[in-house]
Image (spheres, grey):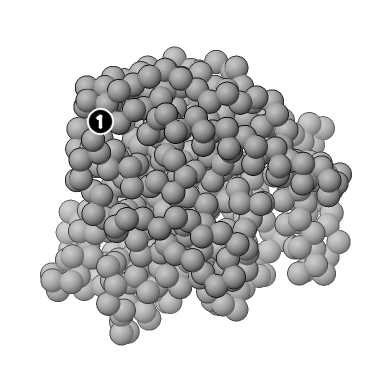
Amino acid sequence: MKGYENLSFLDATALAELVRKKEVRAAELVEAAIECIKKINPQLNAVVTNMDDEARRIAHGNLPDGPFTGVPFLLKDLLASYKGVPMTFGTKNLQQYIPDHDSELVARYKKAGFIVVGKTNTPELGLLPTTEPRLFGPCRNPWNLNRTTGGSSGGSAAAVASGIVPAAHGNDGGGSIRIPASCCGLFGLKPTRGRNPLGPDFGDVMSGLVAEHVLTRSVRDSAAILDATMGYDIGGPYDAPQPARPYKEEIGAKPGRLRIAYLDQPPTGEALSGDCKKAFMDAVKLCSDLGHDLIEAKPNLDAEVLSRAFTAIWAAGCASTITGIGLATRKKPDPNQYESITWGLYEIGKNVSGSDYLFAVQTLQRISRGVARFLLDYDILMTPTLAEPPVELGTFDSPPDDPLKGWRRSAQFVPFTPICNATGQPAMSVPLYWDEKGLPLGTQFIGRFGDEATLFRLASQLEEARPWKHRRPPISV
C-alpha cells in the first residue's frame, strides 16, 4: 500500500475508522505492518516472533465486527497465549513451547478485531525493568539505540513508538507497562487489579501483582481497548468495580478541579536525577495551570518493609515459574539454563517459606489499606515514573559472582512504580517531557482503586494541553 508512512502514526481508533469506511483494507494494513517490521526491526529487535502467514490468513477471512477491526497488533511474548504460536517468556527453556489455546485476553483482542502480526521481546521471565534477554538479545530504544526501552514490555513499547503498530499488549508486575511507556514516550496504563482477565491459565500472578493492558500513542486508544477487554472471566479470583460508563466516553470529558498529591522524592531515599526532577516539576506546574489543586504530600509507608515483602513474593514467583517450566519440559532446573539474575532470584525464592510468603502478602495488604485511606483526601497521587532517564543498555547486567547486582540496580531506577502493583490501584505514565538529549521522561498518576475514569479524563486533558503525537523518534517508519 503506497503512502503507509502517512498512516503509520495514526492511532488504532483512526485506522479502524478507515477500515470501517472502506478507505483502506485490513489486508493492506497487515502487509504494511509486516513491511515495517522488516524495515525497522533489524535496528530495534522489538519483534521476536513473526506471524505473517497467520495475520494474512485472518486479514483475508471473515473479520469480526469489532471496534478495531483490521488494525495490526502485537503481543508481548509473556503470559498471552496464542494458539499454535510459540511463547517463550524470554527464556531458552521454553523455545519449544506452543500453546494449544488462546488466553482469554487474546480471545478478546481477536473479538475486538485486532490482527496479531507478531510477538515482542521481553526480559527472561519478565523479571527486569529492561529488555535484554540472553535468548533474543537486547531491544533498543528508537529514541537512542544505546538506551534501554525499559521492561518488561520493552519490545511492545519500541514497536509502538517507532510506528510499526499503533498499540501493543503489555503486562505489569512492578511497572512493566509504565516503565517502557516512560522510556519510549508513550501512554501506558496499568489497570485496576481484576479489570482485565488472566484466565484460563492463571487466577492471579504473584498474589495479584500482575495486571495486563496495552501501550499506545493516544489516550483514547487505551480507553477504548480497555472497554473491549475488561470484565470478569470465569473462575477469576477478582472482579474490579464496574465503571459508570464506557471509558472512551471519558475522553474529552472535563476532569473537574482535582486534588492532586505530589511526591518528588523516591520512598527509598535515593536521589532523583536532575532531569527527572525538572520534568516532574514541569508536570506539576502544568497540572496547576490547568486549574487543579497540587499539594505536596505522601502516604505514610515504610519503603524498606514494602521492598522486603515485594521481593519475597517476586522471588517466590520466579521460583514457582522455574519449577513449573521444569515440570513442563521434564528437565531439572539448572543454573546453566538461566541468566544469573534469574537464578539468583530462584535461589532466594526457594527459601521463602509458606509462612514467609503469607506474611509478605499480609504486609502488602496492610500497606494497601494505608494508601487507600490516604487517597480519601486526594483524587490522585502524582510521582515521576522513573528516577532516571532511560539508562544505557547493560546497566542491569549481573555477573555470576554477584547475581543480584541487576536487581539492586533496578530498585534505584524504578522506586515509584511497584507500589501500585502491591495495592492493585490503576496508574498511568504520561509522556509530557523530553530532555535535552531527546529522551522521553514520563510522569506517573495513581488513581483510587477502580477509578480509571478519573485517570482517563485527566490524561485526555494533559494530552490536549501538551500533545505528543507529533513527536517521532529517530528510528521510525
Residue 245: x and y, percent?
Answer: 29, 57
Q: Is residue 51 left or right of residue 421?
A: left
Say which residue appears at 60% left-offset and 17% top-offset.
269
> In the displayed structure, would residue 412 be above or below residue 25?
above
> In the displayed structure, would residue 248 be above or below residue 458?
below
Say which residue appears at 42% left-offset and 76% top-offset.
53
**Type of the residue with mark 1:** Arg
Residue 84 vs residue 272, the one in the foreground: 272
Check the image and name the residue furthest to the bottom.
Answer: 62
Residue 458 vs residue 157, the one in the foreground: 458
Q: Is residue 359 left or right of residue 461?
A: right
Residue 182: x and y, percent?
Answer: 42, 36
Residue 287 vs residue 23, the one in the foreground: 287
The quadrant the N terminus occupies is bottom left
| Residue for badge 1 | 257
Q: Is residue 432 left or right of residue 179?
A: left
Say which residue appears at 76% left-offset and 63% top-offset.
324
Q: Quadrant of residue 443?
A: top left
Residue 58 vs residue 294, the one in the foreground: 294
Q: Does residue 36 appear anywhere in the picture? A: no
Say which residue appears at 84% left-offset and 54% top-offset.
334
Residue 234: x and y, percent?
Answer: 55, 72
